[in-house]
Amino acid sequence: MSTILIIQPYKMLQQAFAVALHSDYQVRVQETIPESSAVRDFDVVIVDAASLAERNAGNDLRAVQSWKVPTVWIDKSDAPDTPTRENLVIVKRPVHTDSLRKALLECLTPSKVSIPKTPQSLARSAAANGSKAKGKGKSVAAASDERQFIELVDVVEAPTFPHQNKTAAKKK
């Protein structure tokens, strides 16, 4: 089981992250950015940079640039100070469980080709991954975006087997 550190200053959002991820991962929550040596013990770090900036606790966000541990960076869509490095997956607010799990999976599964990822290349790779998944079946993101309706207009009767007719006749 992978160990995840969640850096989130708001108590309610800490609980939301913990509930969303507790069944698949070991989760530890912290309100501020720790030292680089403390981060090495985790498989993935989730940094809610937007919330840290709102609470004025984002002064140490530059420290994330030097981390070697895979990181999920949650930020606003218009954020100018997004770090660029390997093993960094950017998720825009609002965060949905499916997008968070997809980002974690991308962090936990090392890529075969190590190419430095920029926000633009991440967007392209996410779009490519979505199109690949659609070839096999519907992607998780597409399934959550589109609602499918099933029309139940045909009446289907259960098949009767020979032994069921005899028992039904005896009961009458």
Image: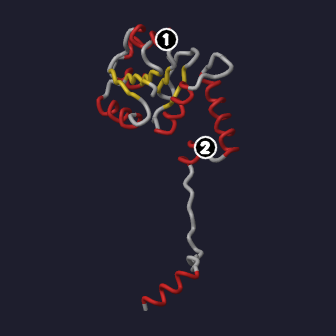
**Where in the figure is residue 38, as x and y percent of width and height?**
39, 11
Image quadrant holding the N terminus, namely top left
Q: Residue at the location (57% across, 14% down)?
A: 85
Q: Residue at the location (49% across, 20% down)?
A: 71
**Where in the figure is residue 129, as x and y percent of width and height?**
65, 35
Q: CA distance from mark 1 to mark 2?
A: 31 Å
Q: Residue at the location (46% across, 10% down)?
A: 62
Categorize mark 2 by other alpha carbons within 10 Å: few (<14), some (14-19), many (20+).
Answer: some
Dividing the picture into quadrants, the one containing residue 59 is top left
- Residue assigned mark 1: 67
- Residue assigned mark 2: 139
Please tell me whether mark 1 sits on a helix, a strand or a loop: loop
Please tell me whether mark 2 sits on a helix, a strand or a loop: loop
Q: Nearer the viewer, residue 25 or 47?
A: 25
**Where in the figure is residue 32, as x and y percent of width and height?**
34, 17
Categorize mark 1 by other alpha carbons within 10 Å: few (<14), some (14-19), many (20+).
Answer: some
Query: In the image, 25: left or right of 142?
Result: left
Image quadrant holding the C terminus, namely bottom left
- Looking at the image, is 159 positioned above or below residue 109? below
Q: Residue at the location (54% across, 34% down)?
A: 102
Q: Amino acid at mark 1?
A: Trp
Asked whether the beta carbons under mark 1 and mark 2 sit within 8 Å of each other, the answer is: no
- Looking at the image, is 28 positioned above or below residue 98? above
Q: Nearer the viewer, residue 157 or 10?
A: 157
Q: Residue furthest bottom?
A: 172
Q: Amino acid at mark 2?
A: Ser
Colour scheme in the image? secondary structure
Q: Residue furthest left?
A: 11
